[in-house]
Image (cartoon, grey):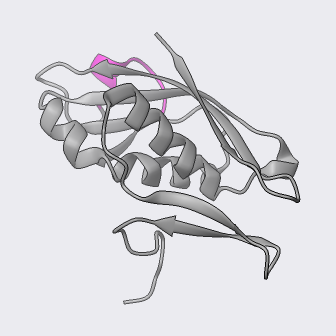
Amino acid sequence: MSTTFKYRLQNPPGGLAADLTAEHRALGAGAGAGAGADAGEGFQLQIYRKVWLAPPRGINWRDAAWLSFGLSVHSSDLSSAHPDGLLIEVAALTFPLAHFRSEVAALAMDGWVRKEFDLPDRGLLAVFDSGSDGYRFHWGENSAPFSDEF
């Protein structure tokens, strides 16, 4: 059954917002690369071992990357709890364009996963920086996602 998590950050210029609707499904002991035999049809990303993400059709690549990151911060816990495999199917990621940045997809996924599986907060958050009229994103103990610096 699908559930929806509503991410909201309110601030003077309006804030950030996204709604993520998803469901999860345990995969069989034989699920592996492609997971498709157990998971049904559609595109799937392997996040970690047997933890898979099926993003919604037509999603922007940046939003898919940030959804993947939001799931990846919990992937070790999810893999331990579901050794035969787990598929997270995102039915929808909706947002008002004026209140969205792709990074918010990670925050919405993080919130959905924590709520759905009762997992601990990993320190992912956004804050409004009034000095720069922008947002600063914090990724907990993770290094800056998608950084090419070595």
Question: Which residue is the extreme one toward the top?
Answer: 1
| Vertical relation: 133 (above or below) 83 | below
Rendered location of residue 142, percent (x, y): 36, 68
Tag count? 0
- Compared to residue 25, the image places residue 55 above or below, namely below
Please state if 121 lies on the left or on the right of 37 as rendered: right
Residue at figure coordinates x 86%, y 52% from the top left: 14
Q: Residue 44: x and y, percent?
A: 42, 36
- Judge left or right: residue 51 versus residue 28: right
Q: Does the magenta stretch include residue 105?
A: no
Q: Is there any visible trace of residue 64 in the rendered image?
A: no
Magenta range? 35-43
Residue 115 occupies quadrant: top left
Of the pair 40 and 92, the residue shown nearer to us: 92
Please give the name of the residue rendered at 61% of the width and 58% of the height, measured from the top-left corner: 103
Image quadrant for the C terminus? Answer: bottom left
Residue 99, horizontal then vertical, whole percent = 81, 50
Front residue of 34 and 24: 24
Is residue 99 visible in the rendered image? The answer is: yes
Left or right, 10 with respect to 72, comes to right
Please determine whether, in this image, residue 1 is positioned above or below residue 67: above
| Residue 29 in the image, given as x and y percentages of width and height | 11, 22
Q: Quadrant of residue 58?
A: top right
Q: Tell me if residue 39 is in the magenta stretch.
A: yes
Viewer-proximal residue among 101 and 10: 10
> Horizontal placement of 84 versus 27: left or right?
left
Q: Residue placed at 13% from the left, 38% from the top?
A: 80
Asked where in the image residue 51 lies, by quadrant, the reply is top left
